[in-house]
Image (tube, rainbow, N blue to C red):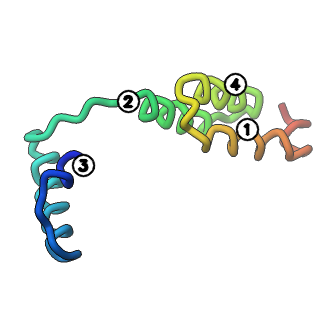
Amino acid sequence: MNEFLKNTDAKDVEEVNEKLQEFIQKYNNNQIKYETTLLDDAYELLEKANQAKIAKGALKLAKQVFDTSNECFDAILFQVEYEDDPLIREKS
């Protein structure tokens, strides 16, 4: 999307919104290809960690997330949230 918007000459918010709508339409019609990044992969893994039913498994996945992409700071926050809660630690 950033690349798409760089190539536009929008002069105000209304024009930017029009270009965003154009981008969405082209993306939905498969006219724009998107290559996933390591950060995208990390967020997919973090979603699995969020859905994990066992705290130990969730933490393991969250650590894998950060190994996948150290730009995924949400993985650190996720780990801190679990590790700082004594009730959750007792359940794992």
Q: Is residue 4 left or right of residue 37?
A: left
Marks 2 and 3: CB-CB under 8 Å? no
**Disc 4 residue crowd, few under 14, some 14–19, many 20+, Cα 10 Å:** few
What residue type is disc 2 on? Thr
Kindly state the secondary structure of the residue where label 3 is placed.
loop
Residue 79 bears which disc, if any? 1
Amino acid carrying label 3: it is Met
Tag 1 secondary structure: helix
Q: Secondary structure at mark 2?
A: loop
In the picture, measured across the screen, residue 58 lies left or right of residue 67, that is right
Q: Is residue 51 above or below residue 20?
A: above
Rounded to the nearest whole Å, what is the CA distance between mark 4 and mark 3?
32 Å
Q: Using the numbered discs, state the Cα–Cα distance from disc 1 to disc 2 in whole angstroms.
A: 22 Å
- Reading the chain from its start, which is encountered first: label 1 or label 4? 4
- From the image, state whether disc 1 or disc 2 is nearer to you: 2
- The residue sitting at 49% across, 37% down in the picture is 43
Whichever of callouts 1 and 2 sits on the residue coming sooner in the sequence is: 2
Disc 4: which residue: 60
Residue occupied by mark 2: 37
**Left or right of residue 6, residue 41 in this image:** right
> Which residue has dot 3 on it?
1
C-alpha separation, residue under disc 2 versus residue under disc 4: 21 Å
Give residue 12's quadrant in the image.
bottom left
Query: Alpha-carbon distance for marks 1 and 3?
Result: 30 Å
Q: Earlier in the sequence, mark 1 or mark 3?
A: 3
Number of the front mark, 2 or 4: 2
Q: Quadrant of the C terminus?
A: top right
